[in-house]
Amino acid sequence: MQQQFEMDRTVCQGEMNKADLSGVTFTGGGMAGAFAAAGRAQEAGQVGQGCMAAKGYVLVREDQAAAKQQELAAIAAEKARREAAAAAPPPAPPEPHRTPAVKPKLQTAAQQSQSAQQAQNQQ
């Protein structure tokens, strides 16, 4: 991890140097020249910070480091939870509603003869 940080810092240092050297700043020895040079150095520093941020680094004051670490851990946990939920298969569709089949009632011989007599009476 330290080696990766060193590589990233070197790359970003190169970006800062390119930003500091690009263009021309007149430093004719007066206060205006000193202010211009300071402004370019500040802009180069911002390029370096932006480069490190793009690589995933965060710059915080030492007294805020523990709180920032907890905040970033919570964000990472929430991201992992969302990714796991997105990767999970969708729930199965509910079973269609089924009505039980109605079985005909068995009739005794007496009930059958009674039904037959009622059918004849109706005719």
Image (cartoon, helix red, strand yellow):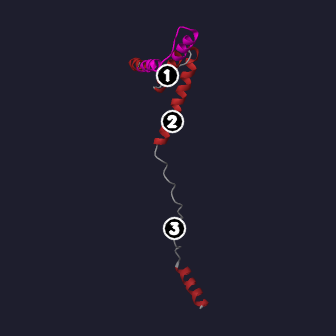
- Label 2 SS: helix
Q: Which residues are magenta?
A: 11-40
Of residues 89 and 36, the one nearer the viewer is: 36
* Image coords of residue 80 (percent x, y): 49, 34
Q: Nearer the viewer, mark 2 or mark 1?
A: 1
Which part of the image, by quadrant, shows the C terminus? bottom right
Camera-side residue of 122 and 64: 64
Numbered disc in front, either 3 or 2: 2
Q: Nearer the viewer, residue 72 or 31?
A: 31
Q: Which residue is mark 3?
A: 101
**Magenta-colored segment: predominant secondary structure:** helix
Q: Quadrant of the N terminus?
A: top left
The amino acid type of the residue labelled 1 equals: Val
- The answer to whether residue 2 is magenta is no
State yes or no: discs 3 and 1 in contact (Cβ < 8 Å). no
Describe the element under mark 3 as helix, strand or loop.
loop
Pinpoint residue 65: horizontal percent, then vertical percent: 55, 18
Residue displayed at 58% across by 20% down: 67
Mark 2 Cα-neighbour bin, 10 Å: few <14, some 14–19, many ≥20: few
Q: Which of the labelled discs sits on residue 47, or is there none?
A: 1
Q: Amino acid at mark 2?
A: Arg
Q: CA distance from mark 3 to mark 1?
A: 76 Å
Residue 45 x, y percent position in the rendering:
51, 18
The answer to which of marks 3 and 1 sits earlier in the sequence is 1
Separation of residues labelled 3 and 2 (CA atoms): 45 Å
Answer with mark 2 or mark 1, whichever residue precedes in sequence: 1
From the viewer's perspective, is residue 64 above or below residue 98?
above
Q: Secondary structure at mark 1?
A: helix
**Residue at x-position 54% and y-position 13%:** 38
Residue 57 placement (x, y as % from top left): 48, 23
Q: Which residue position is annotated with label 2?
A: 81
Give the residue at the far bottom of this rendering. Answer: 123
